[in-house]
Amino acid sequence: MHCDTKTILDKVKSSVILVTDDCEVEYENIGGIPAEALSDDVIVVGIEARDNKVILRLKKSGIEKNDLDVDWVKEDMERTGMEPSFF
């Protein structure tokens, strides 16, 4: 099952603490969380509650987006005349 993090967070009415390998940052409410903190390359690996606060444990997803501007793609497009298929 896939759940959009923002859909869940919109329902939270308390303070939120985001925990990563690097740090732990508390936000007074959902509106204070910067967009890049919950970008597409971040996944939620744990949710818990402590002292009336929601704690989200985050990590980088490790999935790199396809980049059609890298050299090997350009070379392949010149050679074949088509964009590469990633399937």
Image: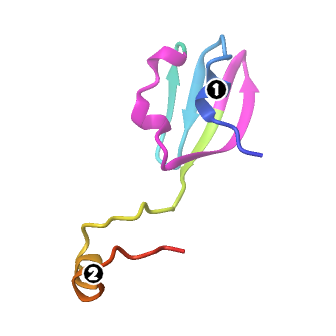
The residue tagged with tag 2: helix, strand or loop? Answer: loop
Residue, far right: 1
- What residue is at 45 percent from the left and 17 percent from the top? 32
- What residue is at 64 percent from the left and 26 percent from the top? 7
Estimate the x, y position of residue 4 in percent, counting from the top left: 63, 36
Which three-letter amino acid code belongs to the residue tagged 1?
Thr
Magenta residues, start to end: 30-55
Q: Is residue 45 magenta?
A: yes
Residue 29 relative to residue 46: left or right:
left
From the image, state whether disc 1 or disc 2 is nearer to you: 2
The residue closer to the viewer here, 46 or 84, is: 84
Residue 14 relative to residue 26: left or right:
right
Relative to 26, say whether 1 is above or below. Answer: below
Q: Is residue 32 magenta?
A: yes
Q: What is the spatial separation of the Cα atoms under label 1 and label 2, in whole angstroms?
A: 42 Å
The residue tagged with tag 1: helix, strand or loop? Answer: helix
Q: Which residue is mark 2?
A: 81
Which three-letter amino acid code belongs to the residue tagged 2?
Gly
Residue, far front: 81
Residue, far bottom: 79
Q: Which residue is mark 1?
A: 7
Residue 73 relative to residue 9: left or right:
left
Quarter occupied by the C terminus: bottom right
